[in-house]
Amino acid sequence: MSTREFFRHGVHPPELKELTAAERIRRIPFPAQVVLPLRQHIGAPAEVLVRPGDRVERGDKIAAANGFVSVPVHASATGVVREISRAPHPDGSYAEAVRIDVDAHSAQVPRARMIPDWRGLDAKQLVAAIQEGGLVGLGGAAFPTHVKLSPPPDQKIDMVVLNGCECEPYLTTDHRTMVEYPERVHLGTRIMMTCLGVDKAVVGIERNKPDAIEAMRATAPSDLDIDIVPLTVKYPQGAEKMLIKAVIDREVPEGGLPMNIGVVVQNVASVATIAEIFETGLPLVERILTVTGHGVRKPRNLIVPVGTMLRDVVAACGGLSDDAAEIIMGGPMMGLAQSSLDTPILKGTSGVVVLNEEQASPRATYPCIRCGHCLDACPVFLDPQHLGSLGLNQEYPSMMEHHLSTCMLCGCCSYVCPSRIPLSHIFGVAKASLRGQGVKV
């Protein structure tokens, strides 16, 4: 099986996917309560539509999109709105959220809805339906999907690139989606291509997922020009710029977007959800989630209602092991450590990784030895050593002069640093501080 590898730099962390790579997707029991933050996507938070005491059914809209770069939020379970208040958010802050007490006796069957035949809709109607379904990127960034499918008229799109890399260690959500629901991925691809008016699609899948490559090839529709491309395993190949370089050898300019070179990139789980919206009429109220790591007793791939608490997700996997020490939402390279089990799963939560004491043990940090490993690892050719020095001195404007906005916080520099300097964290703090000052970064 031939493979491609075009993008330079990056790292090769242990894959650690064997814990769940062969685990079939199963459904979690509905929890006693779900907490649905209004801020679950890049862009303006949704605007609440319900009040305490309102009864809602699974799939009902409880918050409306507040602008073009925004999507609605829907009830992920039938029940009664208990309160609307601030709740813990996975990013470490608190966010306005709708708390729903789930009806323990409900069959959780969504109310009957008219399901439009996507083949009878034009591009604008398809995009509107996708926005109304609350769909965002499920790979972690949570960018509203309909925005990607609405490029400006002067941006000609000629290619759809599907991201099936899932290069983060441990996570197998996209892997299992391609193995178990390949037809749904292809249908979502067809709908995307119709929205954008393109006739070519490419799916990049790292070669450590041979069963996914086989499933996607075996089910590829004969009337679609879709190429399944095996890729050499390397992190962060799932990043848009790296993936585009790897599969079609185009380069996104600094400060630019994939659409500037005629490409729209979408995660395979998001594409499968596009198909699900038109197949079932149900908006994005649940997602497939990998719960894994050596700190959880039974690692699994689960279908989880959005808004389910971390404690309920962990309980569905047998609970924490005796030596569990740290819980990360997302993967270990880019994910965020959580301080509370009362934090809800969001639309963009791709995984939950539980580390044991040995893996999470505090590590001493030492002064930079100017070894240059971080320069060799950075996939976007920054100077993490110099940026880190500026960041430690809070010289944030100077960091912008050295292209901080190009950094995607992939964590490669932190991973290879022999002095264990948390470079990626330093850059994240700098970006947050600059955004608070109104700087686009």
Image (cartoon, helix red, strand yellow):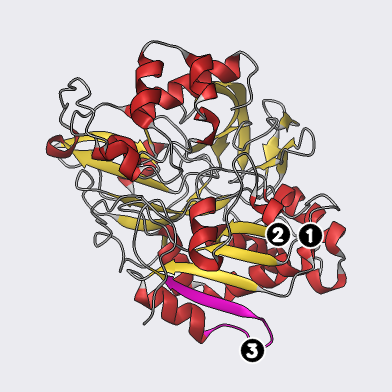
Mark 3, Cα crowd under 10 Å, few <14 / some 14-19 / many 20+, is few
The residue carrying mark 2 is 262
Q: Is residue 220 left or right of residue 411?
A: right
Write the residue at 66% across / 55% down. 110
Report if residue 358 lies within the magenta region. Answer: no
Front residue (pair 414, 196): 414
Q: Position of residue 219 (x, y in %)?
A: 54, 84
As helix, strand or loop, the secondary structure at mark 1 comes to loop
- Counting residues from the start of the chain, the first of labels 1 and 2 encountered is 1
Mark 1, Cα crowd under 10 Å, few <14 / some 14-19 / many 20+, is some
Residue type, numbered disc 3: Ser
Q: Which mark is residue 222?
A: 3
Write the residue at 22% across / 23% down. 368
Q: Is residue 377 left or right of residue 32?
A: left
Q: Position of residue 67 (x, y in %)?
A: 79, 34
Quarter occupied by residue 352? top left
The residue carrying mark 1 is 156
Label 1–label 2 contact, CB within 8 A: yes
